[in-house]
């Protein structure tokens, strides 16, 4: 039987499925302290047990995104606040090449907040 977190990724349609699966593996490979958990009905990535980021699909923009839990402490022009007080999101266009360098820059800055 599949775990809910694995089922989340498998149930997505392409190109979201491939994009989200790449982001999942990429986030986990960024730092040995990052772990994956199923919280609030979504894939959540934690550092030392503290929520760090999550993956979701934006309903309005119909694009996958990385939600940065402490996003309010980061300043990057591509991070969107919307109506969130603490979190910011980075939209990822599943139809285009994934901006790995941009993602790495933002996630490394976020990781430093936990170290």
Image (cartoon, rainbow, N blue to C red):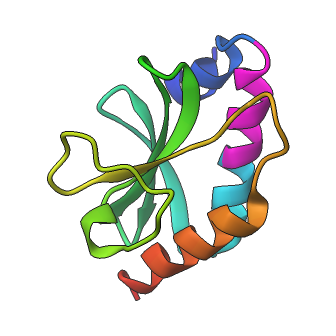
Residue positioned 42% across, 60% down in the render = 46
**How far across and down, in percent of the image, does residue 86 sit?**
19, 57
Residue positioned 54% across, 19% down in the render = 62
Residue positioned 58% across, 32% down in the render = 64
Quarter of the C terminus within the rendering: bottom left
Quarter of the N terminus within the rendering: top right
Q: Nearer the viewer, residue 31 or 2?
A: 31
**How far across and down, in percent of the image, does residue 24 sit?**
66, 46
Compared with 8, 54 (above or below) is: below
Compared with 3, 101 (above or below) is: below
Quarter holding residue 106: bottom right
Give left or right: position of 45 versus 87.
Answer: right
> Which residue in the rendered view is the most extreme toward the right?
97
**In the rendered structure, does residue 41 fall within the stretch colored magenta?**
no
**How far across and down, in percent of the image, does residue 2 sit?**
63, 19
> Which residue in the rendered view is the most extreme toward the left?
85
Q: Nearer the viewer, residue 61 or 109?
A: 61
Give left or right: position of 67 versus 70.
Answer: right
> Which residue in the rendered view is the most extreme toward the front?
77
Compared with 6, 93 (above or below) is: below
Residue positioned 54% across, 66% down in the render = 34
Q: Main secondary structure of the magenta part?
A: helix
Give the extent of the magenta segment.
Answer: 14-23
Give left or right: position of 77 versus 97.
Answer: left
Q: Nearer the viewer, residue 110 or 34?
A: 110
**How far across and down, in percent of the image, does residue 21 sit?**
73, 36
């Amino acid at each position: 039987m599949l775990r809910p977190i694995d089922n989340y990724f498998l149930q997505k349609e392409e190109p979201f499925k491939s994009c989200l699966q790449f982001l999942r593996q990429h986030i986990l490979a960024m730092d040995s302290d990052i772990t994956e958990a199923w919280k609030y009905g979504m894939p959540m990535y934690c550092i030392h047990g503290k929520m760090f980021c999550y993956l979701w699909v934006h309903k309005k923009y119909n694009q996958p995104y990385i939600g940065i839990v402490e996003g309010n402490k980061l300043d990057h022009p591509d991070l969107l606040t919307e109506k969130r007080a603490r979190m910011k999101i980075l939209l990822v266009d599943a139809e285009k090449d994934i901006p790995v360098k941009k993602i790495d820059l933002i996630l490394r800055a976020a990781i430093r907040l936990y170290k």
